[in-house]
Amino acid sequence: MQKQKNSIQIRKVEKNINPLFVNRWSPRAMSGEEISHDDLMGLFEAARWAPSSYNNQPWRFIYAKRNTDHWQTFISFLAEGNKIWAQNAAVLIVVISRKNFEFNEKPAITHQFDAGAAWENLALEATSRGLITHGMQGFDYNQARKELDVPENFDVMAMIAIGKLGKKENLPIDLQEREYPSDRKPLEEIVMEAKFIVR
Amino acid sequence: MQKQKNSIQIRKVEKNINPLFVNRWSPRAMSGEEISHDDLMGLFEAARWAPSSYNNQPWRFIYAKRNTDHWQTFISFLAEGNKIWAQNAAVLIVVISRKNFEFNEKPAITHQFDAGAAWENLALEATSRGLITHGMQGFDYNQARKELDVPENFDVMAMIAIGKLGKKENLPIDLQEREYPSDRKPLEEIVMEAKFIVR
């Protein structure tokens, strides 16, 4: 919880909002401890309630817990830079998203966007529970698809590491230096009235 | 707030989670009232803190407030079925997402997924403030791109209606019948251990 206070202090919040959004960040220092099955299912429960076009719910979550036979398979997908720290996660997830609507098999324009909403619910519920998450693009998408039997009508979207906060000092030096909540573009760069404006 | 209690009652929640996720739903009955500029910026502030690959923050929000010159332009993008109720929103937004990373202009695989995370933050912050949001795919993507000057290196992702909850009775009968928080697939259909499983 100390860490969560820090994240508010470091980040420059322009408007007074629910602190949940600023308290969520993406640490790499994970403790190597397991998390309970109930906590894990609680994260998926939060993801489940995200909105989606036609309530199609394109998101699916394939997970591996540490200390199971599947763990090394999921670790093997990761880029070397992620293996270093993500090996201390409790759970690794591959998020996939169905490309077409189930009710008519037409392309769902927003399916990736909708899956992202579900991922954010998962991440925020983790913050609510004192757990940490870190989304990753640094993995072998084709290998994940092949080894997890992901069918062609789903996109492989991202991997997520979930765990308990560990000691920063246990990270390699270069990652220690990056172990703080990242800042954001100012609001005026992402918000435009009436038309697109080049900033 | 009465409505928010109802949403918990109607929805079958399998696990005990932060109530914010279940309290968020997508009403169509909007009151036609304006919302404050400060509330609107608060929603974008929440969106701003979403995670994204390389912290690239691909999301941009182009908005029009009712009672401005831009309102009818945004309304004109909408499918007829959305115009009927969204005309009573306070703000309409077009969400766009940058396709390539800013730091190297290479394709950002997760940019739509990341933009979806930002949208969910916006929606949840609205719930925190007693406002309502409704995401839409039912609009003319090409017309929105053209009339808002959205450049080719951004995808048009979705539109969002934001407002204050209005009376269900003011909706057309067919929409009144759909005016309740939608349910979701059971957890077991979206969560898989180790491999993709056909459900």
Image (tube, coloured by chain):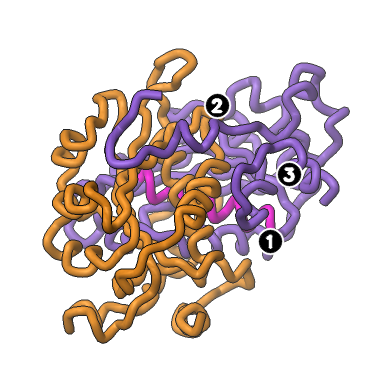
Chain colours: A purple, B orange
**Vertically, is B177 above or below A59?**
below
Q: Which amino acid does label 2 sit on?
A: Tyr
Q: Do labels 2 and 3 share a chain?
A: no
Could you say which disc has been placed on residue A39 in the image?
1
Residue A83's x, y, as percent? 67, 27
Q: Main secondary structure of the magenta part?
A: helix
The residue located at (42%, 37%) in the rendering is: B59
Residue B150: say if magenta: no
Q: Which amino acid does label 3 sit on?
A: Ile
Camera-side residue of B106 and A104: B106
Could you say which disc has been placed on residue A2 in the image?
none
Q: What stretch is highlighted in magenta?
A: A112-128
Q: Which chain carries label 3?
A: A
Disc 2 secondary structure class: helix
Look at discs 1 and 3 and give the one toward the viewer. Answer: 3
Q: What residue type is labelled 1?
A: Asp
Camera-side residue of B41 and A110: B41
Q: Earlier in the sequence, mark 1 or mark 3?
A: 3
**Vertically, is A37 above or below B157?**
below
Q: Mark 2 points at which residue?
A: B54
Q: Mark 3 points at which residue?
A: A8
Residue A49's x, y, as percent? 47, 64
Q: Which chain carries label 2?
A: B
Q: Are marks 1 and 2 on the same chain?
A: no
